[in-house]
Amino acid sequence: MDTTFYHLNLINPLINASGVKCMQSSQLDELTSCNIGSIVTKTCTPLQRQGNSEPRYYEPKNHLLTINSMGLPNEGVQYYLDYYKKNSASLQLSCKGRFLSLGGLSINENLNMLDIIYQNPENLTHLDAIEVNLSCPNIVGKSQLGYDFQNLESYLRIIFTKIETLEETLLVDMIKNLEPGKPELKEKVDTKYKVLIGCKLPPYFDMCHFQVIADILSKFPRLDYINCINSIGNGLVIDSNTEKVVIKPKNGFGGLGGKVIKPTALANVHQFYRLLGDKVKIIGCGGVSNGDDLFQMILAGATLVAVGSQMMIKGVKCIDKILRELEDIMKKKGYSTLDDFRGKLQYL
Ligand code: SIN
């Protein structure tokens, strides 16, 4: 199930969905020791956050969906950088991709976290990707950036200019500090300190909106990948017995995940695959609970595939099962690699 994601050689295409089993080091340890191909941290802010009040997550008995309004509880960016540094050896040994999800509550918080990351270049040697979350639906009083069609481009311009400036400064410093007589190629420095950059997007529902977003994203050549989709924001689940909502924050409104969102996730993955082509790779996320779901995500164009609700419900043991089921499907169909069917969805 070998998977290539740019320069990363991964053991398989699976990654946890950010937010699931990735907030505390014990949870990240569990991910590290399971058979998943990559790990992403809980979306973080510059400092530790408690998040919204509880109950803030709910799954009905039929497991068709989940609803959450966590409100970005996390341990702060430094905690996750330290985790990756401390566990560098085991993560490298198991060939795991190491993703860091950033979700500053303002542009300044995101810029601040980028400063924190780049001010110690060693951080970059323990990281493979930085993902900017543009789509958390659960912060009271904040709208989702991915839906702010007016301001998204200028927001991304500020973020990417910052990243490019930090990278340039780092490169100049590194080259300056090279031992005389031991000239290191610029590319070597690039490979060591250049991480992949991605954005986590909310789901879109209108053909026009896919185009608008793809046009904006295409303006940023430093964008390596998109992760779509985040939960479907502001759903409402009601318990008829109690006649109450099932989570506390925002009067019960929260992000929907699980099986019911898979068609929306597939549509987003496939439409962005069509519109962005080879320029930007895609992590498909939403409703993957078995090997067939994983197969469909790749058929729709995803290179990596995230597992969220299913891992909440079943724990990390679901990873082996999903991979086994995909292997069976591939065997039956006569596919030997994921590239044999990636993006090859057919139309009637
Ligand atoms: C949350 O912490 O509320 C979920 C994060 C997200 O949906 O991006």
Image (cartoon, rainbow, N blue to C red):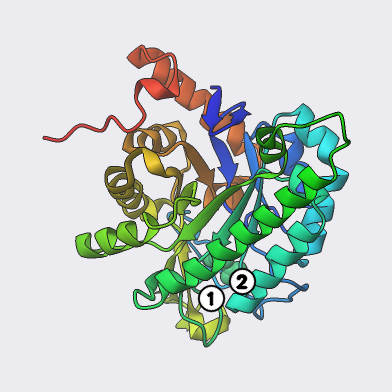
Let me know if residue 138 appears in the view.
yes
Q: Is residue 104 left or right of residue 272?
A: right
Q: Quadrant location of the C terminus?
A: top left
Q: Is mark 1 within 8 Å of ligand 1?
A: yes
Is residue 79 depicted above or below 29 in this figure?
below
Pinpoint residue 111: horizontal percent, then vertical percent. 65, 70
**Which of 118 and 276 lies nearest the eye of the viewer?**
118
Tag 1 near tag 2, CB within 8 Å: yes
In which of the image's four quarters is ligand 1 placed? bottom right
Q: Give the Cα distance between marks 1 and 2.
A: 7 Å
Q: Is mark 2 within 8 Å of ligand 1?
A: yes
Q: Which residue is mark 1?
A: 138
Which mark is on residue 193? none
Q: Quadrant of residue 125?
A: top right
- Residue at 54%, 28% in the rendered image: 4
Q: Which residue is mark 2?
A: 70
Q: Amino acid at mark 2?
A: Met
Pinpoint residue 295: horizontal percent, then vertical percent. 39, 31
Q: Judging from the image, what secondary structure is the residue with disc 2 in?
A: loop
Pinpoint residue 257: horizontal percent, then vertical percent. 46, 59
